[in-house]
Amino acid sequence: MYRFVLTRQWVCLTLVALAFIPATIKLGFWQFHRHEHRVAQNELIEANLRDEPAPVTEVTSPGHRVPRADFWRAVTATGTYDTAHEVVVRMRTDGDDKVGFHVLTPLVLADGRAVLVNRGWVPGGDDPRAFPPVPAAPAGEVTLTGRLKADETSGSSGIKDRKGLPDRQVMLINSAGQAEYLGRPVLGGYMELTGPAPADGSPRMIGDPDHDSIGPHMAYAVQWWLFTAAVPVGWVILVRREKRDLDEQAARSAEREPATA
């Protein structure tokens, strides 16, 4: 009764269905693991933002690679801004997806070392190759609070580190690269400024990272697994419909045979 499933058309359809099942299972687990990663990241962000700020020199040092456990950790630093070596980071967006620059200013500590401080976002001017208008950093000794971030790389950020950029413009925030530019030791990673806020609101400080949303990954995982279950069900439905159509066709042929005899 079901010999038709051995035809070339049905064999190809069955092979495609068999290949689709493990693919959808794997895609479902991929989305599930992304969900787990997002949940763990949210918990890490919340815990690190909630902790009391620690002196940045106790958390990182020159050449130190900031581990994931310290991402967004609240830190403090006291020193003097080195505005002569201030640079801007190209192609950065604000909360409204406007493209501009991040302002990166070294803070020189009492021991002569420096920590990079991302003071926030400023819009670009008419000429993207020109240094944008940047409000001056506070003069004299200042005490800052911020979020510790890891050095950016092309691999981690997806941003290509282009060469031949205009003077005092960079693509990535990287302490090793800035140490060469400054000619002094620079603590690994950088601070994302959270206080004190600029008096005139510029540069616009970067807001807290989102740690409330878990994203759609769990829903996508369930969808893929529903597709997995739907494949054999759909195959059975198609087989039964094909058998019904063949039975009806055979019945009509049997009815016509006596009439033509």
Image (tube, rainbow, N blue to C red):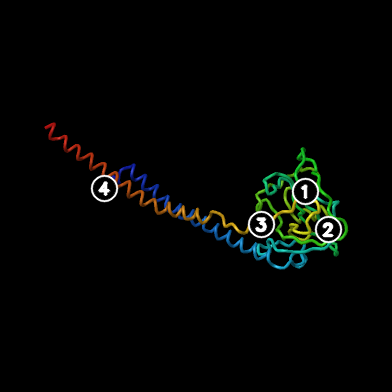
Q: Please tell me which of labels 3 and 4 falls first in the chain.
A: 4
In 3D space, how far apart are the residues under numbered discs 3 and 2 (Cα atoms)?
A: 31 Å
* Quadrant showing the C terminus: top left
Q: Secondary structure at mark 1?
A: strand
The type of residue carrying mark 3 is Pro
The type of residue carrying mark 4 is Tyr
- Residue that lies at the very extreme toward the left in this rendered image: 261
Disc 1 or disc 3, which is closer to the eye? 3
Label 1 crowd (10 A; few <14 / some 14-19 / many >=20): many
Q: Secondary structure at mark 3?
A: loop
Label 3 crowd (10 A; few <14 / some 14-19 / many >=20): few
- Give the side of residue 81 with respect to residue 98, left or right: right
Residue 11: x percent and y percent? 34, 45
In 3D space, how far apart are the residues under numbered discs 4 and 2 (Cα atoms)?
A: 79 Å
Q: Which residue is mark 4?
A: 2
Q: Please tell me which of labels 1 and 2 falls first in the chain.
A: 1
Label 2 crowd (10 A; few <14 / some 14-19 / many >=20): some
Q: Which residue is mark 1?
A: 88
Label 4 crowd (10 A; few <14 / some 14-19 / many >=20): few
Q: Which residue is mark 2?
A: 184
Q: How many marks?
A: 4
Q: Mark 1 and 3 residues: CB-CB less than 8 Å, in contact?
A: no
Question: Dividing the picture into quarters, in which one does residue 49 lie?
Answer: bottom right
Q: Please tell me which of labels 3 and 2 falls first in the chain.
A: 2
In 3D space, how far apart are the residues under numbered discs 1 and 3 (Cα atoms)?
A: 21 Å
Disc on res. 209: 3
Disc 3 or disc 2, which is closer to the eye? 3
